[in-house]
Amino acid sequence: MTQSIRRSSLGPLADPQVHQLLRPDGTLRESSAQAVGDDVLLEGMHWMLLSRAFDVRAIALQRQGRAGVVSPASGQEASVVGSALAFDPRVDWLVPQYRELPAYLIWGFPLEHVFHNLTGRPLLGRIPDHVKMLPTQVAIAAQLPHAVGLAWGLKIQKKDGVVLAYFGDGASSEGDFHEACNLAGVTQAPIVFFLQNNQWAISTPRQLQSAARYLADRAAGYGFAGEIVDGNDFLAVHEVTERAVERARSGKGPTLIEAITYRLSFHNTTDDPTRYQDPDLLESAKANDPIDRLERYLRLRGLWDDDRHAKAVASAEARIEEAVSKVAAAPRPEPHELFDNIFAELTPAQQRQRQELLDRATE
Amino acid sequence: MSRMNIIEAIRSALASEMERDERVVVLGLDVGALGGVFRASDGLLGRFGPGRVIDTPLAEAAIIGSSIGLAVSGLVPVAEIQFLGFTHQAFHQIGAQLARFRYRSRGRFPLQVTVRAPMGGGTRTPEFHPDAIEAQFVQSPGLKIAMPATPVDAKGMLLAAIRDPDPVLFIEPERLYRADRMEVPDDDYVVDFGAARIVRSGTDVTVIAWSAAVEVCERACELLTARGISVELIDLRTLVPLDVETVTASVQKTGRAVVVHEATLTAGFGAEVAALIQHECFFSLDAPVERVASYDTPYPPAAFELAWLPFPQRVAAAVRKTVEV
């Protein structure tokens, strides 16, 4: 009984409400057309392969005790890359949760900085000043009011820019999600709420989060558009997101996109999905891998082959190895640097504590 | 100079800073046409327009959370939460988000954000309206906490808060909003944070308070003067940063200390002040440090309020107790 409740699902993808262009076998659906240029598809493939390779390497580093907690994006690459490539990182802002690695890289956040943060060099992992991205957010959904304020502030000041905010199915149960969507609707802020429904909030399945048929159905209650898309279909994700970006850019307000996808890995490196996940479900999800689907399509189109694939994977792995080796040579922070960036000027109490720490180091 | 009460001083500060810095926006529930439930923003909508004086939905977490994003976008938000007790519904956006953003972003995103909210009892309002929960925010490094007690401080400290490059929780003494007027400079001025105010000098005992409790202590001082006890009364003005030197210099002189606050006793900020005094002034103390605070109960119905809050006779009794040791 309990087992049947805890069994998650891939979502009702056969439902015509769920936007899909590519079938899992990589063929275009009838009456569908590729709206995006081939260059974007090829760029998307490279980012997705880099993301998957990163997950493998980062998890290995964590298992060796060389990296902290890792939250893989595996299985969600089409959802993240397909949406992120619909924005212009020169003017648009990215507000992450924490499972969207390829989007950070697309925005210009350096891969080395990702590894600096993972390997205990937080000050070196700072977001560069030219990268329009907020820090990753550990408190689920807490970033959503920030994203709305940012979009609203751009609108008030008549500045260009649309905000992309990522979050998941679990986040949609939080109060901050509701307050943020409601405020975005009232202010008609230029924002795209991108909900990655990966079916799991750690071990809690999608159906225990909400009785709503689709999480994006809630958009109606906030007075803006909701879109439901097959999150493992790069083409469909990109098309739906482009539409939402255009809506926001032209002053027509927010969109809530629900991308139905599946978390192929664990919640993070502390998690053990074998305790709660039906292995058959995972197997069927693996058969629906988003990278494989785009690859099949590109092969059918003659844009991809074994040689290109091998080169792309090798190039991704080389880029990762280069970043890992650079980071390994970087200095560790000094303990007193833990007092950096609290205030413009430390309080007297903090100054005393910092001095105490320095004195202890010289004892 | 103009004669102003505290609410007028706050309004004056908001207006002059909005005039001086066009990035400043005021947002919150009812701040527009109504001018705020206490009229702190009265007249600002007509003067600065709906793009800068913004009524929001009733959602405290969204008011604070969106202020974070507004600041990142280049504005200087001054958010109003109608009563400090309602910041419970935005607590996660204040302590865990607003306060930590500079740190979390390794200095990339300092947040010039002010959150204004009144607190304090004695006005027969229901719970939440008067709750003195300032200590709950002190354990949020990255947040400054300012608590003026007079019209002059209210204006000068609010101007300092809005201009501060870091987030400030600006807590106003609700009961004193329309108490006595005093001469307030018309000019632009700031009262620096971390500098306590010696309300009156004395030699026998140091009394330390903040917000509306300062006024309670002033009345207690009148009772004590009549009994020949000389009190040095200190208004901390800001809990973060805390002016340790003024407090310790005074207690080293008097040898006795009483801390007074409206918040409940246990783990109130008075405990921090008492710990500080015993550590810094141990060899000067002639008596245990006394604390006068509300009892450890939920905020009581109005019928109990006056027995629950610190009142001048209770403060005076605590002072006499330290003097008689």
Image: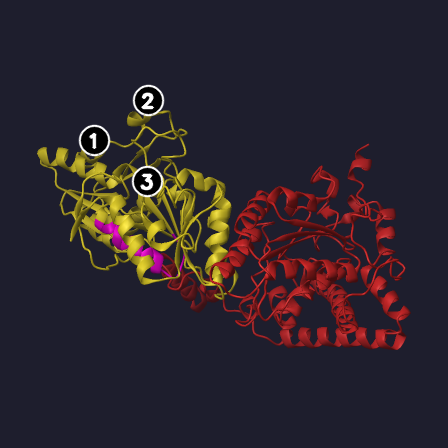
Say which label, 3 or 2, has the lower sequence index: 3
Q: On the same chain: label 1 and label 3?
A: yes
Q: Chain B colour? A: yellow
Any magenta on residue A250?
A: no
> What chain does mark 2 sit on?
B
Looking at the image, the residue that sits furthest to the top is B303
Q: Position of residue A312 (x, y in %)?
A: 80, 75
Q: Quadrant of residue A107?
A: bottom right
Secondary structure at badge 3 equals: loop
Q: Is residue B172 left or right of residue A292?
A: left
Q: Residues within 10 Å of mark 2 (few under 14, many from 20)?
A: few
Chain identifier, colour red: A
Q: Is residue A95 visible?
A: no
Q: Position of residue B248 (x, y in %)?
A: 24, 51
Q: Which residue is mark 1?
A: B317
Any magenta on residue B161?
A: yes
Say which label, 1 or 2, has the lower sequence index: 2
Say which label, 1 or 3, has the lower sequence index: 3
Q: CA distance from mark 1 to mark 3?
A: 34 Å
Q: Position of residue B92 (x, y in %)?
A: 51, 46
Image quarter in which the N terminus of chain A is found? top right
Q: Position of residue B318 (x, y in %)?
A: 23, 33
Give residue B38's mark: 3
Tell which of B59 and A59 is nearer to you.
B59
